[in-house]
Amino acid sequence: MHYIKPKNPSFPPPSHVFLKTFPLPPPSSPISFVKGTMNATPEGVTCQRWDSQFPHNHSFLPEHFKCKNLTENHCRNPDGADYPWCFTTDPKQRIAKCTHIPRCDAEAKRKTGKVL
């Protein structure tokens, strides 16, 4: 576990924050890099900015994951999960999968009738 002191003292930080670290996927993982501007969950909850620690503290900071395109509050997949995801701005829901983003293989199948 790591202790991270928030950079932005304008929000009320908890008295202490412990973060869990996650292993990185292999660089060749086909789903580890996501681009696009989807910034809400399938239910319409706005995603939290990756450079923010409020309302959810996390270790996926853009400066530590430069190749993962952690821009603004867009759905991304920095840990190689099944789907892109984001931290949400809802204090009661930490993470949401962005399952409404079409996968490249699904898009190719829809256009050609076969998986490439």
Image (cartoon, rainbow, N blue to C red):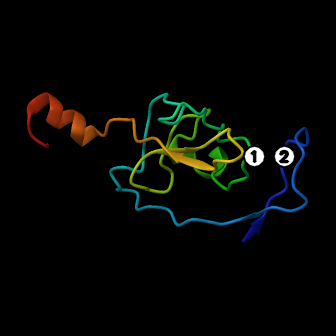
**What percent of the width, then of the height, locates residue 59?**
67, 56
**What percent of the width, then of the height, locates residue 63?**
66, 47
**What percent of the width, then of the height, locates residue 114?**
9, 40
- Quarter occupied by residue 55: top right
The foreground one among 52 and 87 is 87
Mark 2 to mark 1 CA distance (whole Å) = 9 Å
Q: Nearer the viewer, mark 2 or mark 1?
A: 1
Could you tell me which residue is drawn at 10 percent across and 31 percent down? 112
Few, some or many C-alpha atoms within 10 Å of disc 1 (few <14, some 14-19, many ≥20)?
many
Q: Is residue 84 above or below residue 5?
A: above
Q: Is residue 107 above or below residue 15?
A: above
Could you tell me which residue is drawn at 54 percent across and 34 percent down? 74
Kindly state the secondary structure of the residue where label 2 is placed.
loop
On the rendered structure, is 71 left or right of 105?
right
The foreground one among 41 and 116 is 41
Could you tell me which residue is drawn at 64 percent across and 41 percent down? 50
Please identify the residue farthest to the left as the structure is shown.
Answer: 113
- For the residues bearing labels 2 and 1, Cβ distance under 8 angstroms: yes
| Number of marks in picture | 2
Q: Quadrant of the N terminus?
A: bottom right
Could you tell me which residue is drawn at 75 percent across and 46 percent down? 53
On the rendered structure, is 90 left or right of 100?
right
On the rendered structure, is 75 left or right of 82?
right
Residue 53 bears which disc, if any?
A: 1
Kindly state the secondary structure of the residue where label 1 is placed.
loop
**What percent of the width, then of the height, locates residue 80?**
43, 56
Q: On the image, numbered disc 2 is attached to which residue?
A: 7
Residue type pointed to by label 1: Gln
Few, some or many C-alpha atoms within 10 Å of disc 2 (few <14, some 14-19, many ≥20)?
few
Q: Earlier in the sequence, mark 2 or mark 1?
A: 2
Residue type pointed to by label 2: Lys
Please identify the residue farthest to the bottom as the structure is shown.
Answer: 1
